[in-house]
Amino acid sequence: MSTSNRSSYHHGALRPALIAAARALLLDEGGPAAVGLREAARRVGVSPTATYRHFKDKDALLAALAVEGFREFGAALAASERAPEPLTAMGAAYVDFALSKPGMFRLMFSPMLSARRDDAELRAAANAAFATLARGVGARSDAPPSAQIPAAAIAAWSLVHGLSHLILDGVLPREAAAAFKQAILGPAKDAPGLDFLRPR
């Protein structure tokens, strides 16, 4: 490794480099189980002890990676806010994200990260994505009363999250993903899966 790289890592580039290495391990080599501080350090070209200046353990590295995932996920949902039917577009974007980045998606919603409720950065990134989904519920022409929007957002989240996992796990055929999205989300007026959001 060059002296210039070592210098740049010393001045703050090591953390993003480790996250990038962890991302490659996550996406290319088998999910969270493939990620480790030692291997990330080897790929970056620093000693394993150097990683501890930025991450106390593997879980901390995975949490930092999940923060990136939630921010990208939130951006994909936010881009759908400009669609004629924002919630329907968000549902499709949700499934598309899961299918295009399965390792990241599984990490973001893994039990390991659910246990890191004290991680302020991770919590903020996840909450921001959920807030975007809630805005999608509120933007519907037949949106429920404001007090019911959080529960309706969780219901919509459960629908697309379940569909995503059924496809990822092979219960539903991946080649039919577009058809399932259309049948379940469809145009809002024809979307039976979203009927529960309509006020009674």
Image (cartoon, rainbow, N blue to C red):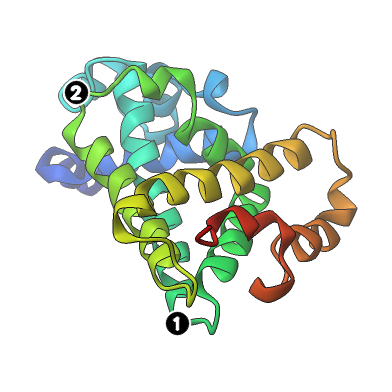
Q: Quadrant of residue 105?
A: top right
Q: Nearer the viewer, mark 1 or mark 2?
A: 1
Neighbours of disc 1 within 10 Å: few (<14), some (14-19), many (20+): few
**Residue at position x 36%, y 32% from top?**
45
**Residue at position x 55%, y 62% from top?**
198
Q: Where is 79 relative to 93, above or below? A: below
Mark 1 lies on a secondary structure that is helix
**Residue at position x 54%, y 33% from top?**
26
Q: Nearer the viewer, residue 183 or 47?
A: 183
Give the alpha-carbon distance from disc 1 to disc 2, as whole Å.
33 Å
The quadrant in which the N terminus is found is: top left
Mark 2 lies on a secondary structure that is loop
Q: Where is 177 relative to 151, above or below? A: below
Q: Give amino acid for label 2.
A: Asp
Residue bearing the label numbered 2:
118
Who comes first in sequence, dot 1 or dot 2? 1
Q: Quadrant of residue 131?
A: bottom left
Percent coordinates x, y for residue 58 in the rendering: 36, 18
Percent coordinates x, y for residue 110 in the rendering: 49, 25
Dot label at residue 82:
1
The answer to whether residue 72 shows anywhere in this view is yes
Q: Quadrant of residue 42?
A: top left
Q: Where is 149 relative to 66, above or below? A: below
Q: Nearer the viewer, residue 64 or 73?
A: 73
Marks 1,2: beta carbons within 8 A: no
Q: Nearer the viewer, residue 47 or 103?
A: 103
Q: Give amino acid for label 1.
A: Arg
Percent coordinates x, y for residue 5 in the rendering: 25, 45
